[in-house]
């Protein structure tokens, strides 16, 4: 195809004059003058001659018939579009920087949330056989409702491996907790797991030394993590076969070394002992009626999991000859348990996946808000580019070519924003990792690069699509006559986008406030016991002996700074184990509601400051109290007992007399209702020593305690923590949500305000002559302020009216996850609406005041 010649200058001049009627031509040339400021002082005829040449030089690629462009024309067109883009960025600096800052900030949020979400979704996915790895759970019908628990019976794995051909391997695990390992007088505390011999056949924890099918074959073998091996032996070489002591009591032979658990493993442990050894010392776990360990299965390829779940429905019922018919086992993908760990009435109903979805939506909204700024400012500036578009279309440019040009501008801006955002994320990532409690890293792998490319492309298309389509749709005659039919629609679109921005901002403000108030509520509400200044000390070594335990408690109460101490089998911050082996007069035979059990020693109720409702606490003055029992109010109410003091119940077949009823207290998070609970004296079942420390003497008490423990319990390091710290950890997820939501809400508001500032500045600029005329005719500065802020106020108020009911629904839905929750007060919503309006006013105040006080002469002067 022959290349087309450019339109002759005289013909082009006549053509443009015909359309512009001799007026618009001057404006076109005037716009071009700004590109070469050094010629502004030259005579007018020289400037016009110079710019005529450049006009046709720049437009030459488009002065062709509507045929397929040649490669040379395409290259020239690309060069031309890039030059125009650069000049527009330079010419409209305020819009460019507002969009750049807004998009960069939005992309920072996108990248940070992406890294967090990717880490959450990757949790436990590293196992080689992840698609075949399952965990068994049980639905338990209590008669009053269904609960789902992760604990199973001790013989489960063995039975499944032997009886179910669909199962390739099965393993049981249970926690060892923190115990002391010793080698050559060196003591190291670690967290361990009892695991079946096939554990490493299921889970892909890499063995540095040892074989996966042998390391747990012997009951006296122990497998160490790399870190623990280095701590004990100084190396991982030639460690297998060495003998170490566990709790300075039993000897174990090292059979293997495994790589430390990766960060994306929900289970972190330092050593493994054999589950078979656990069963030898815990006969209660060898029957089908008791539950505590966890069961994991490696299914064979091609197994239909739904059919398998139907097959094992009666497993526990069959093994117990129908006596445990209330327990229904099922299996679920192991890597799903971390994210989908919440069940209601036996049906999966959420978990951590809720927060993954929540922050993904927030990231999307922030990106949309940033794109809205671009769309708003671009369409608002459209009239400045109508002449450019008109000339190109008149000279034969395709609409697709124009759309590509403006989409190219937005994609280029998106790319620049991405580069800046990556640099910001690199700087902020350590702080963000601290907030989320993760070790997040940016790795420029194929997955991330693909994701970033998609984000740039989507952001560019989303931000530039409306301006591109809007600018390219008009015909040239309407453009040169400034007769654009889309003005009203454009105005309403811009207003709608601003309303959308502030609606989202209002929802985020209220959400942050509600989360903050709920967390404040959990921290300040009376729990029914005193959690402050209570030290929790793990029982180990000499403290494992009941007689030594009593001596230890007696002695530390005499230490300066310690007021009172006792021992408990419950940590006061979670479900530590329940039983339905409790019977009372009138109990429904079908009722299997579990009562929380709390074994204690004398004085524990005083340590915790738990108040008696009626009756008395355990006392050493009454030796017969070892056969007595104390309930909480919830337990008495559930049993339906009136005048309970003196009545007799049966616990595991043994009669116990009720001597007291304590007021309800919270021993779990506020997500749970207060459950029925009982206390009984059982020193051998306690796991912790709790000591109340005198306020203001915490350091002195800890120093005295550490010194005494070192003498009393040599070779065993003291492990202690404060109860209020454990309590705060119950709401770690909510606190992180609160902090992250605060940051993201602030960013969303900042981006919205940036766009609003740019839009108001441009509106004020366009109405500058109108303002000058109004001032000449007598309008006051106050009147001008009202004129410019009236439309804005209407839009924000409309956003408030839309956002408030949405916020109420979202906040109420989130609070439903708490059994004890705050009341949604009216001032939450009024305050958020007023804050949004105030922020909007403050955002535009400077620009409006500046415009309202401008000199009328400057307003009417031609540029």
Image (cartoon, grey):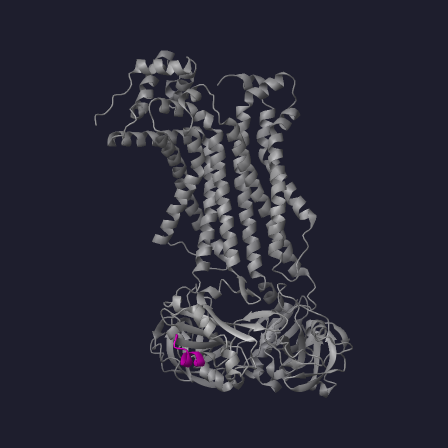
In-front residue for pair 239/619: 619
Instruction: Examine the rendered structure and indicate whether residue 639 appears above or below residue 67.
Output: below
Residue shown at 67% from the left, 84% from the top: 650
Left/right of residue 561 with respect to residue 315 in the rendered view: right
Residue at x 59%, y 51% (from the top left corner): 810
Residue 308 quadrant: bottom left
Whether 525 is drawn above or below 790: the answer is: below
The answer to whether one can see residue 593 in this image is yes
Q: Quadrant of the N terminus?
A: top left
Instruction: From the top left corner, tell me how far across and down residue 275 is, in percent.
Output: 46, 81
Q: Which residues are magenta?
A: 158-166
Relative placement, left or right, of 530 versus 297 is right
Q: Is residue 83 magenta?
A: no
Front residue (pair 616, 349): 349
Q: Main secondary structure of the magenta part?
A: helix
Vertical position of residue 244 compared to residue 695: above or below? below
Quarter of the view holding residue 88? top left
Total residue callouts:
0
* Image location of residue 389, percent across then percent down: 39, 25
- Where, by quadrant of the figure, is residue 238 drawn? bottom left
Outermost left residue: 2
């Amino acid at each position: 195809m022959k290349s087309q010649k450019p339109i002759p200058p005289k013909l082009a001049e006549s053509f443009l004059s015909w359309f512009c009627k001799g007026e618009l031509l001057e404006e076109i040339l005037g716009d071009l003058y700004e590109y070469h400021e050094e010629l502004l002082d030259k005579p007018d005829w020289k400037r016009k001659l110079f710019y005529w040449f450049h006009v046709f030089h720049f437009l030459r690629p488009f002065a062709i018939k509507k045929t397929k462009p040649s490669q040379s024309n395409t290259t020239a067109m690309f060069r031309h579009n890039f030059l125009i883009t650069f000049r527009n960025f330079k010419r409209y600096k305020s819009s460019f920087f507002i969009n750049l800052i807004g998009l960069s900030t939005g992309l920072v949020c996108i990248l940070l949330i992406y890294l967090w979400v990717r880490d959450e979704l990757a949790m436990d996915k590293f196992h080689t056989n992840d698609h075949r790895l399952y965990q068994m759970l049980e639905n338990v019908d209590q008669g009053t409702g269904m609960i789902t628990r992760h604990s199973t019976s001790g013989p489960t794995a063995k039975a499944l491996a032997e009886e179910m051909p669909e199962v390739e391997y099965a393993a049981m695990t249970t926690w060892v907790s923190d115990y002391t390992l010793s080698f050559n007088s060196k003591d190291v505390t670690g967290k361990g797991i009892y695991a079946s011999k096939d554990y490493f056949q299921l889970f892909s924890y890499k063995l540095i030394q040892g074989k996966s099918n042998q390391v747990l074959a012997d009951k006296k073998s122990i497998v160490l993590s790399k870190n623990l091996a280095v701590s004990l032996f100084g190396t991982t070489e030639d460690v297998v076969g060495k003998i170490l002591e566990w709790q300075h009591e039993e000897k174990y032979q090292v059979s293997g070394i495994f790589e430390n658990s990766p960060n994306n493993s929900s289970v972190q442990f330092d050593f493994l002992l054999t589950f078979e050894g656990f069963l030898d010392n815990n006969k209660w776990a060898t029957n089908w009626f008791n539950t505590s360990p966890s069961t994991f299965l490696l299914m064979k390829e091609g197994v239909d999991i739904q059919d398998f779940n139907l097959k094992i429905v009666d497993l526990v019922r069959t093994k117990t000859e129908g006596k445990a018919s209330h327990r229904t086992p099922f299996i679920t993908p192991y890597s799903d348990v971390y994210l989908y760990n919440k069940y209601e009435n036996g049906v999966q109903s959420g978990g951590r996946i809720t927060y993954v979805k929540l922050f993904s939506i927030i990231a999307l909204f922030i990106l949309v808000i940033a794109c809205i700024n671009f769309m708003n400012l671009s369409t608002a500036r459209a009239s400045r580019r109508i002449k450019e578009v008109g000339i190109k279309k008149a000279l034969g440019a395709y609409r697709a070519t124009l759309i590509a040009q403006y989409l190219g501008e937005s994609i280029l801006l998106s790319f620049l924003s991405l580069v800046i955002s990556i640099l910001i994320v690199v700087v902020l990532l350590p702080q963000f990792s601290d907030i989320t409690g993760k070790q997040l890293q940016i790795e420029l792998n194929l997955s991330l690069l693909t994701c970033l490319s998609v984000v740039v492309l989507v952001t560019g298309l989303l931000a530039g699509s409306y301006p591109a389509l809007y600018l390219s749709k008009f015909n040239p005659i309407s453009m040169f006559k400034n007769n654009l039919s889309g003005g009203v629609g454009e105005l309403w679109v811009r207003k709608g986008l601003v309303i959308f921005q502030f609606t989202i901002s209002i929802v985020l403000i209220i959400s942050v406030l509600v989360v903050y108030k709920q967390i404040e509520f959990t921290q300040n509400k009376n729990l029914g016991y005193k959690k402050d200044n209570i030290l929790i000390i793990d029982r180990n070594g000499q403290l494992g002996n009941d007689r030594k335990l009593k001596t230890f408690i007696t002695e530390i109460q005499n230490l300066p700074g310690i007021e009172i101490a006792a021992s408990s089998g419950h940590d006061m911050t979670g479900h530590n184990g329940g039983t339905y082996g409790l019977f009372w007069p009138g109990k429904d035979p079908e009722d299997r509601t579990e009562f929380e059990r709390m074994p204690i020693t004398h004085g524990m109720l005083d340590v915790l400051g738990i108040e008696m409702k009626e009756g008395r606490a355990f006392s050493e003055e009454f030796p017969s109290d070892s056969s007595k029992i104390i309930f909480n109010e919830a337990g008495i109410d559930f049993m339906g007992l009136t005048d309970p003091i003196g009545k007799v119940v049966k616990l595991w077949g043994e009669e116990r007399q009720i001597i007291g009823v304590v007021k309800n207290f919270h021993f779990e998070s506020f997500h749970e209702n207060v459950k029925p609970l009982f206390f009984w004296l059982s020193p051998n079942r306690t796991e912790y020593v709790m000591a109340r420390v005198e306020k203001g003497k915490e350091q002195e008490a800890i120093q005295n305690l550490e010194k005494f423990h070192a003498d009393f319990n040599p070779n065993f390091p003291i492990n202690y923590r404060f109860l209020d710290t454990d309590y705060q950890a119950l709401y770690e997820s909510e606190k992180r949500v609160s902090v992250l939501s605060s940051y993201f809400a602030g960013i969303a508001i900042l981006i919205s305000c940036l766009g609003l500032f740019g839009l108001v500045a441009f509106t004020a600029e366009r109405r500058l002559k109108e303002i000058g005329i109004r001032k000449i005719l007598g309008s006051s500065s106050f009147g001008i302020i009202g004129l410019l802020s009236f439309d804005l106020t209407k839009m924000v108020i409309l956003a408030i009216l839309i956002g408030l009911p949405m916020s109420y629904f979202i906040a109420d839905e989130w609070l439903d996850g708490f059994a004890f929750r705050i009341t949604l007060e009216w001032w939450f919503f009024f305050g958020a609406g007023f804050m949004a309006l105030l922020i909007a006013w403050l955002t535009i105040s400077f620009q409006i005041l500046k415009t309202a006080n401008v000199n009328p002469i400057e307003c009417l002067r031609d540029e």
